[in-house]
């Protein structure tokens, strides 16, 4: 396989002295295509570590790297697809001419042939899966990873996804993992690693969210907020709307104290309101009468 340095020098020469007029490849293809192109060079050189490859490109061909949009989020989202393309057994022979000069057009063609993965949610879900396949110990899986990318792209276009943003993202990740699981025994291992990582990430997000909500609540109390009043105004709206959901709105205080303390449910909240409402209304009326005297 051609050395990465030689490929990058060829790319640098093409980028600076090749077609640069309006309508040329440099102008015609956007930063996504160029990021795909650069990471494909890593795959052609047999590189498997995208982070190390990014550093090598910065050192060897900084003009190519920065013009390619290789810094930041775009690199993390699109570089795995390009590397998967470069690692595919057939593409290495197609991408280099007999003289060893790169043919960027073929790589660009592969980049723009993935319209389904242009979607932000799709690319964010697919990229870590593809990265994990590339890092696997299975040569067969690495060689077939770009075929999996093409299947992800087709699935992204053809499937019906939930309208809720969080549910849509969860469904996309699950569907893409299933494609990898169905590929081979190596794919099952990769999917298991990804599922474990996702569970850990969800637990981390839940803990962070809980901490943030607690801090927000403390700040609101210091500012003079009435959490019980807020909770019951939410409850009043929920009742007025006909109780459309199967769960209670939040925040709602727990019912009772000590051993009798209960988690709020639709039924026991309404039962307790029915018991407490007459006495509470009477108390408010008497207080109003005293103030009027």
Image: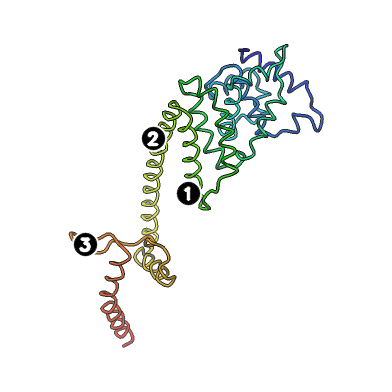
What element does badge 3 sit on? Answer: loop
Percent from the top left, x then y, of residue 88? Answer: 59, 22
Asked if the residue at tag 2 contacts the one at tag 1, i.e. Cβ–Cβ closer than 8 Å, the answer is no
Residue occupying the point 37% across, 49% down: 210
Q: Is residue 137 left or right of residue 124?
A: left
Q: Which residue in the protein does label 1 denote?
A: 167
Question: Going from the N terminus, do you reach mark 1 or mark 2 first?
Answer: 1
Between 145 and 170, the residue placed more toward the observer is: 145
Residue 224: horizontal and vertical position, in percent?
A: 38, 63
- Disc 1 or disc 3, which is closer to the eye? 1
The residue indicated by pointer 3 is 257
The residue closer to the viewer here, 158 or 276, is 158
Q: Nearer the viewer, mark 3 or mark 2?
A: 2
Horizontal and vertical percent position of residue 39: 61, 25
Quadrant where the C terminus is found in the figure: bottom left
- Residue 96 lies, with reference to residue 111, above or below; the image says above
Q: Is residue 51 left or right of residue 62?
A: left
Which quadrant holds residue 148? top right
Q: Quadrant of the N terminus?
A: top right
Q: Which element type, helix, strand or loop, lies under badge 1?
A: helix
Query: Of the residues under marks 3 and 2, which one precedes in the sequence?
Result: 2
């Amino acid at each position: 396989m051609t050395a990465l340095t030689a490929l990058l020098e060829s790319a640098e020469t093409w980028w600076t002295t090749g077609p640069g007029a309006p309508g040329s490849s440099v102008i015609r293809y956007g930063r996504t295509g160029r990021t795909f192109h650069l990471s494909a060079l890593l795959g052609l050189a047999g590189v498997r570590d995208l982070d190390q490859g990014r550093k090598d490109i910065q050192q060897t061909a900084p003009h190519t790297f920065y013009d390619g949009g290789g810094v930041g989020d775009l690199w993390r989202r699109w570089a795995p697809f390009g590397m998967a393309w470069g690692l595919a057994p057939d593409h290495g022979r197609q991408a280099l001419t007999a003289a060893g000069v790169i043919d960027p057009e073929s790589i660009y063609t592969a980049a723009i042939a993935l319209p389904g993965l242009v979607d932000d949610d799709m690319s964010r879900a697919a990229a870590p899966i593809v990265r994990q396949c590339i890092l696997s110990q299975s040569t067969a899986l690495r060689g077939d990873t770009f075929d999996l990318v093409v299947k992800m792209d087709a699935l992204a276009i053809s499937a019906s996804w939930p309208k809720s943003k969080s549910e849509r993202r969860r469904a996309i990740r699950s569907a893409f993992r299933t494609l990898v699981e169905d590929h081979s025994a190596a794919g099952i291992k990769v999917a298991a690693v990804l599922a474990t990582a996702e569970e850990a990430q969800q637990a981390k997000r839940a803990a962070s969210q809980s901490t943030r909500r607690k801090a927000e609540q403390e700040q609101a109390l210091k500012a003079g907020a009435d959490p019980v009043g807020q909770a019951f105004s939410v409850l009043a709206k929920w009742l007025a709307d006909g109780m459309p959901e199967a769960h209670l709105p939040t925040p709602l205080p727990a019912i009772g104290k000590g051993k009798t303390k209960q988690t709020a449910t639709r039924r026991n909240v309404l039962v307790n309101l029915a018991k407490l409402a007459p006495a509470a209304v009477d108390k408010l009326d008497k207080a109003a009468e005293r103030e009027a005297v």
